[in-house]
Amino acid sequence: MPGDAGGADKLRSVPPGQDVDMEGQGEILRIEERPTPGTRDLIIDPTTNLITDENFQSLPEPYRVGRYGYSPNKVALTFDDGPDPTWTPKILDVLKREQAPAAFFHDRTTGDKFSSIVERAYREGHEIGNHTFTHPDISNVSSTYVKVELNLTERLFASRLGIRTVLFRPPYSIDEEPDTADQVRPLEITQDQGFTTVGTKLTPATGAAIRTVRRNRSSLTCWDTCRHACQTISAAATSSCCMMAGATALKPCGHCRELLMVCGLADSR
C-alpha cells in the first residue's frame, strides 16, 4: 500500500513468473533449474515517498526444463492408457513380427484388469511405464496425492511383473509439453523419486507429427485403447518408416493414412 512503512522491503523480492524455459530436443524431460526470486534495490524519494528507480541485483528465474533423447532418423514408439483387450494384442503381434521395441504407459484401470497383456508386453521386451494409478491431472492435486498415485502403480507393477519402472508419463498436464510452472511443479516429485519423465509432444492426429515424421523422425505417442486403435496401429507402421508395413491392412483413418503415405506405406487413393 502507498505510504506503508514496510512497503519498500516487500517489493525488494521479485517472484518468478509462470513461464517455463524449455531447452534442447527430445521427449525426456528433466528439471535442471527450479524457480528462484530476483532481488532489487529501490531508490525512494524521501519527500514523496515514491519509488524513483530500481537496480536489480539478480533477476527472477523460472523453471528450466531440459529436453533430451532426440536422435536423427529414429522414432520412439510409445503407447498410453492401455492395454485394450482387442487392439493391444494386435499391436504386440506387429511389434513382435518386425522386432520393434516400444514403451507402454499403464495406469491401474486397465493395467490391473488386463494384466496378462501387460505381462506379455514386458515378456516380449517392451518397456513398461508409470502413468499414475487413477489417471488424474497431477497439476491439480496435492503432492501427497501424487506420491500415493506413483506408489500404488509401482506396487501394481511389482506384484504383476516383479519390477520397478523408472519411466513416468503424466496424464493430461503435459499433453504436448509443460508450459506453465503449475504443470512443471509436480515433476519435482517424480524426479526426486528417481523417475524419468517422458513427454507427449507428438501424436498421430497432429499435423506436427506428420511434418516431423516426414522431416527427421521423433517420439510418437499413441493410445492402445479402442477409441484410438486406428491411430495407434497405423502410427506403428510409421515408427521406422516401413518397419511395420503390415499394419496398413487395418484401414487407418485420415490422419493415420497421411502418416502412412509419408513413409510410402499407403497410396494416395
Image: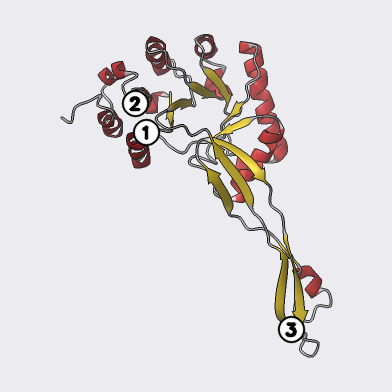
**Secondary element at tag 2:** loop
Dividing the picture into quadrants, the one containing residue 93 is top left
**Secondary element at tag 3:** loop
User: At label 1, which amino acid type do we have?
Assistant: Pro
Which residue is at a point 63% across and 23% down the rendered structure image? 153
| Residue at which label 3 appears | 50
Q: CA distance from mark 3 to mark 2?
A: 63 Å
Number of the label disc, if any, that sits on residue 238? 2
Image coordinates of residue 212 in percent, x first then y, are 37, 38
User: At label 3, which amino acid type do we have?
Assistant: Leu
Which residue is at a point 33% across and 39% down the rendered structure image? 211
**Secondary element at tag 1:** loop
User: At label 2, which amino acid type do we have?
Assistant: Thr
State the residue lying farthest toward the bottom.
47
State the residue lying farthest toward the right.
5
Tell me the quadrant of the picture where the N terminus can be found.
Answer: bottom right
User: Which tag, 3 or 2, sits closer to the chain's start?
Assistant: 3
Q: Nearer the viewer, mark 3 or mark 2?
A: 2
| Residue at which label 1 appears | 204
Q: Is residue 241 left or right of residue 2?
A: left
Dividing the picture into quadrants, the one containing residue 149 is top right
The reply to whether discs 3 and 1 touch (Cβ–Cβ < 8 Å) is no
Image coordinates of residue 230 in percent, x first then y, are 33, 25
| Rendered view: 190 above or below 112 | below
State the residue lying farthest toward the left.
269
Q: CA distance from mark 1 to mark 2?
A: 10 Å
Q: Nearer the viewer, residue 73 or 10?
A: 73
